[in-house]
Structures are given as C-alpha cells and as structure tokens.
Image (cartoon, rainbow, N blue to C red):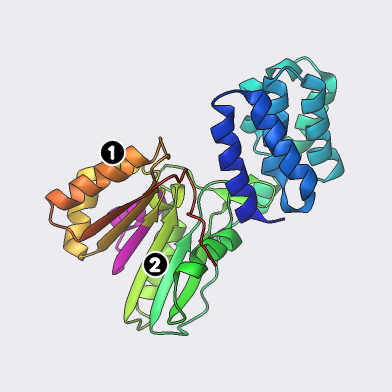
C-alpha cells in the first residue's frame, strides 16, 4: 500500500465530507477502485463510516468484512464505536467483526515496543523524524527524506502504541513521549555537528514534550502540521526550555488545517515574544498533510 498517497486522498475525502457524505463516498470509492493496492485499513474504515453516515449500513458492513475478515486487518477498539457506524450497533455480524478486531488489537498491544532505527553515526548531521498518529516510521521516512540533502543521516523513532494494523499513535500523557526523549539523548553524545528533529502532527507534541520534560536537546525543531495540546499545560516551561537550550524552531502548517493552524500561530507568537529564532510558513491550500513535492 502507498500510505503517503492514501493520506493525501483521505484528506481530500475529509474536505468533501464537510459538504456531504455522499459525494465524499463516491470520490473515495472511485479512487479505491482505480488502485486498490494503494489503500489500506484507514481507507476501508473511511469507506465504512461514509457509507454508514450516508444511510448504507449494509455497504458499511461489507467494507468492514473486507478489512477485518478478508484482509486480516484490525482497528483500535474505540474507532469502531464511531457515530457513523451507529446503524450497525444492533447487527450481530458487526459485533462479531469488532470482537475479532479487538482481539487482534489486544495481541498487538501485548507485543509492541518502540522501534528506534539509529545504529550509530554515519554522517556529521542527523535528522530524527517522528511520525504522527495513524502513521508509522516508514511513512515518516518517506515524508522527510525528499526535504533533506545527502549530508543528513535520517533516522526514525516509532511509537510502542498500535493505532491500527500497521500504524501507531502517541498519547498525550507523561509517558508516550519518553521513547522520543530517550532517542534524542542517546544520539547527543555521538559526535554530530548538528542534530535536528522533525515531527508531523502528534509527533510535534512528542518532540516538544521531550525537549521540555527531559534533558533531551537538539539544534533545531521542524514542526509540520503541529498538533500540540501540551502547549496549554506546559507552554511557559516549553518556551523557557527552548530559550535555555538555544533551539531554533521551524513551523509549517497548511492554510486549510483548521485544527492545527491556530496552535502553530500560537506557538510562533510565544517564540517571537521570547526572542527565540523561529519561522512560520503557512502552506497555501494545504490541509493536515505534508505539501505535495513537484518533480
């Protein structure tokens, strides 16, 4: 599957769904039928929810059968409790599928652990990429690699918390960020001339928590589409720590990212007030995603 393409298509689907589920369902269905191998569990979940929300419960159930029964995928238990699937709440077949998915999720949780790709110094400059929710380390690598030149050693840290089949998530608590902090600290003494860290969405929150709540430090943070709830609870501590650790902050966010753009602008304003080197780029026409890169 092509997670990058899937994510971009799903962002377009969300945009269409704001005006009505029927059009969004038709759009995603057409994209899926053209190249089904490009799509994974998230796309089938979207199709199920759009069908359910559009008054097509049997079609919604068909998509879940394909995902869970035929493809062997699974989802975080709470996502199958979505209001758009409420029409299936009394359906025994749906409950059987959910029980199967929940069991697979529990097994995955019991075996999962954080995965850090770093194996030693290979260049003088290092970039640590942190994925967002419903993503994984491979997608983070694919997103950041085109933005870096060959002088950078690109490494990833993947969460220990499964989100769905093949994807992971970060929780906004006092524990989920620890693997990120540990990864940065492990690399600090390796002799790099420069260390930069980049996060997408929830990955930005994990990076900021690592910097604010641990000895971890780097030279620069690059925050793409930052979803950063820690700003409310630890904003002052964060700003003071960034100032003390002399960390430059680069923020990038889509102009159509209604949830994250206010957070991006709030963080930038706080950084400016504290005279911390910072940049804010608003990516015109972009939603909650990396911008498309022209070849």
On residue 288, the disc is: none
Give residue 80's position: percent from left, percent from top: 67, 29
Question: 229 or 53: nearer the eye?
Answer: 53
Confirm whether the magenta stretch covers residue 195. no
Quadrant (top left, top right, bottom left, bottom right) of the C terminus: bottom right
Quadrant (top left, top right, bottom left, bottom right) of the N terminus: bottom right
Q: Secondary structure at mark 2?
A: helix
Question: 136 or 26: nearer the eye?
Answer: 26
Q: Is residue 196 left or right of residue 271?
A: right
Q: Residues within 10 Å of mark 1 (few under 14, many from 20)?
A: few
Q: Earlier in the sequence, mark 2 or mark 1?
A: 2
Going 45% across and 83% down the picture, which residue do you hit? 121
Going 49% across and 49% down the picture, which residue do you hit? 289
Q: Residues within 10 Å of mark 2 (few under 14, many from 20)?
A: many
The residue under label 2 is 184
In this picture, which residue range is highlighted in magenta?
205-222
Res 254 seen here: yes
The correct choice, above or below, for 55 with respect to 256 in the image is: above
Give residue 100's position: percent from left, percent from top: 79, 36
Label 2 vs label 1: CA separation?
23 Å
Q: Secondary structure at mark 1?
A: helix
The residue under label 1 is 233
């Amino acid at each position: 599957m092509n997670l990058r393409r899937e994510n971009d298509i799903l962002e377009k689907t969300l945009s269409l769904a704001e005006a009505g589920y029927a059009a969004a369902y038709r759009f995603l269905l057409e994209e899926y039928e053209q190249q089904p191998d490009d799509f994974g569990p998230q796309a089938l979940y979207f199709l199920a929810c759009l069908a359910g929300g559009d008054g097509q419960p049997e079609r919604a159930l068909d998509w879940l059968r394909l995902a869970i029964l035929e493809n062997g995928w699974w989802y975080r238990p709470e996502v199958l409790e979505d209001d758009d699937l409420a029409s299936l709440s009394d359906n025994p077949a749906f409950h059987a599928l959910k029980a199967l998915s929940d069991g697979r999720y529990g097994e995955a949780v019991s075996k999962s652990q954080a995965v850090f790709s770093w194996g030693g110094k290979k260049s003088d400059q290092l970039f640590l990429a942190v994925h967002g929710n419903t993503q994984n380390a491979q997608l983070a690598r694919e997103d950041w690699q085109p933005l870096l030149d060959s002088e950078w050693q690109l490494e990833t840290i993947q969460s220990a918390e499964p989100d769905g089949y093949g994807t992971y998530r970060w929780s906004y608590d006092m524990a989920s960020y620890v693997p990120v902090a540990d990864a940065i600290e492990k690399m600090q003494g390796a002799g790099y001339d420069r260390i930069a860290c980049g996060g997408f969405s929830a990955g930005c929150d994990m990076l900021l928590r690592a910097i604010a709540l641990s000895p971890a430090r780097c030279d620069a943070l690059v925050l793409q589409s930052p979803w950063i709830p820690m700003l409310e609870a630890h904003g002052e501590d964060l700003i003071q720590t960034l100032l003390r650790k002399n960390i430059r902050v680069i923020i990038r966010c889509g102009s159509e990212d209604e949830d994250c753009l206010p957070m991006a602008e709030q963080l930038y304003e706080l950084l400016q007030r504290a005279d911390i080197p910072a940049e804010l780029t608003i990516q015109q026409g972009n939603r909650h995603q990396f911008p498309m890169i022209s070849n």
